[in-house]
Image: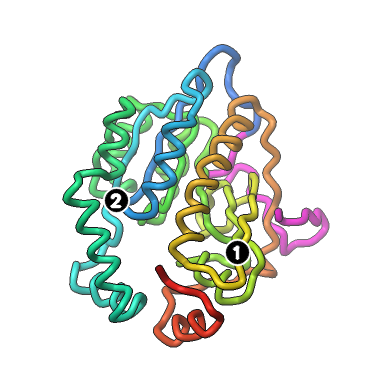
Amino acid sequence: MTATQHPADARVIDHGPLPGAVRPGGIEPGRALRVLVVTEDDPLYVIRFFEVFFAECPREEIEIVGITVDKAFHEPLPKTFKRMWSFFGPVDFPLLCSRYAMVKLGGRNIASLARDAGIPLVETTSVNDEAYIRRVREEIKPDVIVSVAAPEIFKKDILNSAQIGCVNIHSGRLPIYRGMMPNFWQMLHGEKHATVTVHEMAPKLDAGRILDTLEYPIKERDSLHRVITETKREGARLMLRVLRTLKDGTAEPKPIDMSEAKYFSFPKPADVKQFRKRGHRML
């Protein structure tokens, strides 16, 4: 589902030339779209996006010129541990930890996938760092910057660093499911589908114009693990479709009606209790 355009409604945001907004026109024929990716180091779920994205990317059309893999949470490890324990609970949390440990011991992560695919790693402590932005503009020169679960808010300078613009993939229907853990909240609220949205990035979080969406069916009794895993995989294919439209200039960004906007923070134990009461599982 995409946002409906109401030109006369002042609540509908049409960003035009704001930082991050997609510029029309595509690129000159005969060359590949240059794409820089920014993501987080998540070997359990976000990696599922890149397994598909790297494998199915048509290199003659889309050239991934670099990837920046940032820390998953910009917070002390004990705080992350406490957050995950509170979210998954005493049964699922140890199981999650064992899965994480097995993956880490195997050495398979997003960075290793990128290296195997011949994609350069572009390291930084922050995407808003001046040196990083200078390197992006002067050396990498991307047409598009793609954010996939990037753990930082992109500020004006990085948003203005790509020729066509910056795009983000969000695992929720916008603007209703802005914020954290959108798959969880969509399942908790009884949605029939998890909506994945690709949108242009704007200074306001999850408020850029919508480029395309897909709907992934949610079972009556489902697992968060399954829904996150499959929406990551299908989201990769959605992103590739969007990048093709940006390349050939056929993208049609749809303004987003922020009068419907909501924002969800990280779920609390009471939310998880209600989630399980609906018949859903975490893992």
The crowd level at tag 2 (other Cα within 10 Å; few <14, some 14-19, many 20+) is many
Comparing labels 1 and 2, the label whose residue is closer to the camera? 1
Q: Name the residue under label 1.
A: 218
Q: Name the residue under label 2.
A: 41
Q: Give the range drawn in magenta.
A: 1-23
Closer to us: 88 or 243: 88
Closer to us: 69 or 164: 69
Residue at figure coordinates x 56%, y 72% from the top left: 221
Quarter occupied by residue 189 = bottom right
Determine whether label 1 and label 2 are within 8 Å by CB: no
Give the side of residue 23 with respect to residue 123, left or right. right
User: Is 80 a magenta residue?
Assistant: no
Residue at figure coordinates x 40%, y 56% from the top left: 153
The colour scheme is: rainbow
Look at the image and tell me in which quarter the C terminus lies: bottom left
Q: What residue type is labelled 2?
A: Asp
Look at the image and tell me in which quarter the N terminus lies: bottom right
| Figure check: 120 above or below 263 | above
How far is mark 1 from mark 2, CA to CA? 26 Å
| Figure check: 207 above or below 30 | below
The answer, for residue 8, to whether it is visible in the render is yes
Q: Main secondary structure of the magenta part?
A: loop
| Figure check: 83 above or below 248 | below
